Image (tube, rainbow, N blue to C red):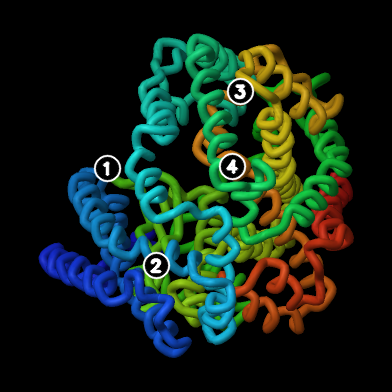
Amino acid sequence: MQDMKSLWDLTPLFKDKDSLQVAIKKSIENTKIFEEKYKDKLHALSPKEFFILVETYENNCEDLARIMTYAFLSFAANTKEGAFYAECEMQVNKAQESLLFFEVEFNALPKELQEQFIQQGGKYTYFLELLSKNAKHQLTLPEEKILLKTQPVGVDAFKRLFDEHFSRIKFKFDEQELSEEEILSFLYHKDRETRKKAAQSLSLELNRNIEFLTYIYNVVRKDLKIQSELRGYESLEESRHISNQTTQKSVDLMVQTIDENVKIVEEYYNIKSGLLSYDKLYDYDRYAPLPMSNNEVFNYEDSKKIILDTFKDFSTKFYEIAKKAFEEGWIDSHPRDNKRGGAFSHSGIASVHPYLLLNHTNQRRDVFTIAHELGHTIHQNLSYSVGYLNSDTPLTTAETASVFAEMLLFENMKDSLKKEEKIALYAGKLEDIFATLFRQNVFTNFERRIHTKEGELSTEEINTIWQDENQKMFGDSVILSENYRLWWSYIPHFIHTPFYCYAYSYGQLLVMALFGVYREEGKSFIPKYEKFLSLGGSQSPKDLVAIFGLDIEDKDFWKIGINEVRLLLEELKGIL
């Protein structure tokens, strides 16, 4: 079968760049009209008039999202479009300045009037409740504008410096000078000496830059403390929990549950050591491919069929959305010069559809990538029903459909494989889960210790905490070398978004728990799951999970997910 390629059709967004420029001018004009009509007048509106205001606000936001979706996708498809993207961003930011007053002014309303607007907010009730929760942490409009204006020369400047510095660093490997991404890819190489050399090269260059990277991390630590004090957060984590629409209690229960079950990781890597015929695993052996891994080819057409069959067996809605994505220009499928790497599903706007970027290279992992991104697409498409302001999901639930789709594909593929292939499939799935669940939890425990320390930390202090938290996960199964002590320093989430990483663990364990419920309930689970996805971000994760009769603030909920991970390990052991 000929392997066809898919390309995006952006005309549902805009016919061309000229029509986009007309839309930008119109949006700037509309946001100014909105500001002139409503600024300093919220207190005088009736609930009905306030509802019309929020509808108008949502329409303005969606118009700007249409513009930035087109600009972003143009840039992703061809990175030479950077100037066009930057110009659109500047113009849209100009329009957004006219909308900035709304949230600040709403949160400054008398409590009684604010509650009245919330109670009679209809479909916007939860959105308004979220704004209200931030009220006590919001500063005055002039103060917020000052922070917005100075942001590029504050901690954001150090974040940019971190990114630009790493983009310039080269890692020596044999006679080559490699990028960070290239040197990290060698940690997955089948040859042990190659992996060891890659780890040494990475560590050597990190060590050359470690004082500089330590300084940036200390700036980030100080900024988090200052921001928390200015905005009156009860803890350094609270702002992240508000953003993720979850509670400290549920996060603590999740972390505790994962900490109590790290022996799963240790047991797996002891098995992997035997499969590789190694006496001991070192840090550079963690991602070593198993000897039974093969190079079976999955071209794009094969991948489409496998995924569509998987979705069709599960849900007609899932199948229909995925089929549209393949047939109606929602996907840019293959790598090419100047195209962005990686994969994503961009939600776009309800009046159009999501757009998926892939870089398909005919490997089995590419099939799982398509399933993952189509999971996002299905979630985004279903959530359009609750409107633009409600459709965006917090990270704690954003990965639900994507990881669930991967699990559906895994279940569909595993029974058709020979023993050797099945071992490799199970090992790959467990290692993916460990990377998302246990490793990100290590990152969270590391950050909790780092950010509660007073004053500037030395490199050695940070190294020691990093090594200690990682060794707890691996136990006696993996020896972490002295080189590994430095590897905290290239993790961008520690710099860009402190306490971001726990949401990956949260999402992964949430999915495993839901998949456990699916195993128990079968087809009766599917309508509830479709409802869960259709509600997008219009309800809290706690209320969404309650659809299944579960409670994220009950430790037993998190145990369901852990038991699913343990089941995968037991199934692997049963194959061996």
Instruction: Give me the residue at 56% from left, 29% from top.
Output: 222
Sequence-earlier tag: 3 or 2: 2
Residue linked to disc 3:
487
Calculate the distance from the C-alpha at mark 4 to the C-alpha at mark 1.
Answer: 43 Å
For label 1, the residue is: 337
Viewer-nearest of discs 4 and 1: 4
Is 208 situated left or right of 63 in this image?
Answer: right
Q: Which residue is mark 2?
A: 102
Would you say residue 7 is visible in this rendering?
A: no
Three-letter residue code for mark 1: Asp
Q: Nearer the viewer, residue 489 or 309?
A: 489
The reply to whether the C-beta atoms of the residues labelled 4 and 2 are less than 8 Å apart is no
From this view, report whether residue 537 is shown above or below residue 215: below
Where residue 147 appears, x then y in whole percent? 40, 44
- Is there any visible trace of residue 191 in the rendered image? yes
Q: Earlier in the sequence, mark 1 or mark 2?
A: 2
Q: Amino acid at mark 2?
A: Phe
The image quadrant that residue 449 belongs to is top right
Helix, strand or loop for disc 4: helix
Q: Earlier in the sequence, mark 3 or mark 1?
A: 1
Which is nearer the N-term, disc 4 or disc 3?
Answer: 4
Residue 132 location in percent, x, y? 56, 66
In the rendered view, tell whether residue 419 sits above or below residue 404. above
Tell me what residue is drawn at x 32 percent, y 43 percent. 149
Residue positioned 40% across, 33% down in the render: 154
